[in-house]
Image (spheres, grey):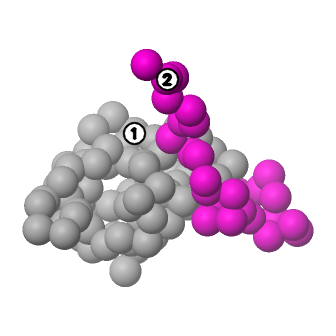
Amino acid sequence: MAKRIGGMRRKTRHKFAKNVRSRGKFSLADYFQTFKQGEKVCLVAEPSIHKGFYHPRFHGKTGTILAQRGTCYEIEIKDVAMKKTLIIHPVHLKRI
């Protein structure tokens, strides 16, 4: 059989691209932000940090915080008709 080509960030050149002037920089306030259970958040990737990243198909989705797991959070999102639980670092989350 043929070998599977590409990893998780395949075909995301424009989706996760940052502005030229903000490349490499990220906000420490976003990195250390905290959330409470039941809060609504939007999945907005910070491409310069790979820790706690989610799959690109979930980019821009809205979900609710279920619990904290270490430094990351468990987020429940609705993908078509199924509810899915993702473990995401807070730097990739935006409060709604």
Magenta-drawn stretch, dominant element (helix, strand or loop): loop
The quadrant in which residue 93 appears is bottom left
Camera-side residue: 65 or 35? 65
Q: Which residue is mark 2?
A: 2
Q: Position of residue 43 (x, y in %)?
A: 42, 65
Q: Quadrant of the C terminus?
A: bottom left
Task: Identify which residue is drawn at 19% across, 69% down.
Answer: 80
Q: Is residue 16 magenta?
A: yes
Q: Residues within 10 Å of mark 1 (few under 14, many from 20)?
A: few
User: What's the distance in space between the residues labelled 2 and 1, CA to CA?
Assistant: 38 Å
The dot on residue 88 is none
* Tag nearer the camera, 2 or 1: 2
Magenta stretch: give its range. 1-27
Q: Is residue 13 visible?
A: yes
Whether residue 33 is visible here, answered yes or no, is no
Residue 83: horizontal and vertical position, in percent?
13, 59
Point out residue 67 in the picture as x, y percentages from the top left corner: 20, 49
Q: Earlier in the sequence, mark 2 or mark 1?
A: 2
Circle 1: residue type: Thr
Q: Look at 80% across and 52% down and name the residue there.
A: 24
* Numbered tag placed on residue 71 in the rendering: 1
The residue depicted at 52 percent of the width and 55 percent of the height is 91
